[in-house]
């Protein structure tokens, strides 16, 4: 089982030191209220992770290509009763991440007035280049805590996929019990509700 390490906080954009005083954490409801009142817009490059507003990194072309290829491949594979979305929010108890790709129960018309909840998501994918550390720590921890069954990291630096399964749920140190790596020539199983619905060749997804 992978060891969780705490990510290092990035420096503030204006060069100021990271505050040492207690910082206020937002609830998901407060985060939604900020959007409803125009304090945050859908164009603001932030997402709510474990109560913190975290700045989203700039997406470069390899990241966008991998996201597109993975979404398209999953879209062709998933059976009726599921749909594939990209870079849209998923609501958990304390977070609202925006995974690069997600496989969600039902159809998009089922979510006209709210975002999908964690228990309606079978698979999330994060495409990682400069975000690899965050995706292996904060994102993995919050997805495991939420009980999302399968988490893929498309590791662009390493040219492979990391697949995490068997989440612990709300444990003292949430994590996934099983980790498997898939190189470019390997086929990645796509598992929804514990059933393998097909396989995707990793090299077809990588940029």
Image (cartoon, rainbow, N blue to C red):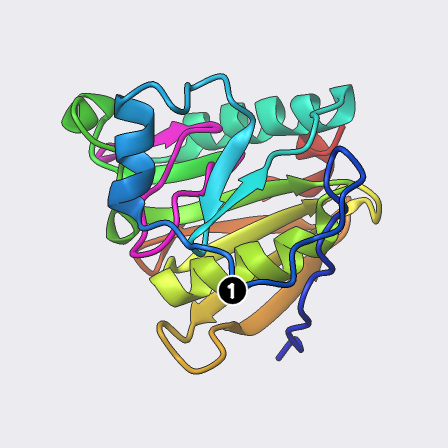
Residue 49 place in picture, x, y as percent: 48, 50
Left or right: residue 49 versus residue 7 is left
Residue 44 place in picture, x, y as percent: 51, 22
Residue 134 place in picture, x, y as percent: 66, 53
Q: Quadrant of residue 68?
A: top right
The foreground one among 130 and 48 is 48
What residue range appears in magenta? 79-100
Left or right: residue 146 versus residue 70 is left
Determine the residue positioned at 30% across, 46% down: 28
The foreground one among 9 and 112 is 9
Q: What residue is pinned by disc 1?
A: 141
Left or right: residue 142 versus residue 61 is left
Residue 79 place in picture, x, y as percent: 30, 35
Left or right: residue 16 versus residue 52 is right
Q: Quadrant of the C terminus?
A: top right
Determine the residue positioned at 47% across, 74% down: 174
Residue 199, visible in the rendered structure: no
């Amino acid at each position: 089982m992978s060891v969780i390490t705490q990510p290092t906080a990035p420096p503030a954009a204006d060069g100021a030191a990271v505050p040492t005083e207690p910082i206020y954490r937002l609830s998901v409801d407060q985060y939604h209220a900020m959007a409803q009142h125009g304090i945050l817009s859908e164009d603001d490059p932030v997402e709510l992770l474990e109560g913190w507003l975290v700045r989203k990194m700039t997406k470069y072309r390899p990241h966008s290509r991998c996201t597109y290829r993975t979404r398209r491949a999953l879209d062709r594979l998933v059976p009726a009763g599921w749909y594939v979305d990209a870079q849209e929010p998923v609501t958990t108890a304390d977070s609202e991440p925006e995974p690069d790709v997600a496989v969600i129960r039902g159809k998009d018309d089922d979510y006209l007035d709210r975002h999908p909840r964690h228990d309606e998501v079978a698979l999330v994918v994060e495409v990682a280049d400069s975000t690899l550390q965050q995706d292996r720590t904060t994102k993995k921890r919050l997805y495991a805590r939420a009980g999302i069954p399968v988490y893929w990291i498309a590791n662009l630096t390493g040219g492979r996929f990391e697949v995490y399964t068997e989440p612990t749920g709300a444990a003292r140190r949430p994590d996934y019990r099983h980790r498997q790596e898939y190189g470019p020539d390997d086929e990645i199983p796509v598992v929804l509700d514990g059933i393998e619905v097909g396989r995707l060749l990793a090299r077809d997804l990588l940029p």
